[in-house]
Amino acid sequence: MVLHYPVKNSSGFTLIELITTLVIISILAVVGFPKFFDSQSFSERGFFDEFINSVRYAQKAAIGSHCEVQVAISGNSFSLNQPVKGGCGNSPTTFPVPVSSPSGNFAATTPDGLNISGSTFTYDASGAPSLAQTITVGSRAFKVHNNTGYVEKL
């Protein structure tokens, strides 16, 4: 007499499936993880957004105060400045008074390894820039248009 035992279906993974899954996860880890943990690109984007919004604010401050506002740009920082009281409209050459905001002055230094290329310019009381230019912050850029002062991300 021959006994037949019922065949059990196993519900696990084969060795080949496990090895293939581990290889795919390893490749994704090597390629993908550095993208998630690279804070330089996040810092660059944050600084770029802060800078472009400050330049837009400079134009609004010039129109609102009926006084020139200077956007001072150096290799690794920017600041917004105005002339002393009574110096508005007289083509001032110095801008010693920082434009302030509720959280401090409109000034910032770039994160490490990031530079700004562009020249210092002023917005007059009508909001027109003294110099139309393209300003680059790391790998991002924006343009300040002539006459209108419109700030456009490129």
Image: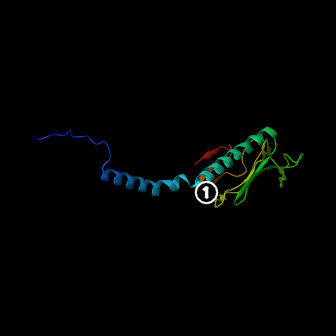
User: At x 70% / y 59%, what residue is drawn?
Assistant: 76
Front residue of 110 and 135: 110
Q: Residue 131 vs residue 101: left or right? A: left
Query: Between 117 and 146, which is closer to the camera in this rendering?
Result: 117
Q: Specify the color scheme.
A: rainbow
Q: In the depicted view, which residue is nearer to us: 7 or 20? A: 7
Q: State the residue position of label 1.
A: 138
* In the image: residue 66, left or right of residue 51: right
Q: Residue furthest front?
A: 1
Q: Is residue 120 in view?
A: no
Q: Where is residue 115? Give x, y as percent.
A: 65, 59
**Secondary structure of residue under mark 1:** loop
| Residue 112 in sight | yes
Total labels: the figure holds 1
User: Quick one: which residue is furthest to the left in this view?
Assistant: 1
Residue 41 image point, x, y percent: 58, 53
**Does residue 131 appear left or right of residue 4 in this picture?**
right
Q: Which residue shows up at 28% across the image and 42% down it?
A: 10
Q: Where is residue 66 in the image (x, y as percent from the top left)?
A: 81, 40
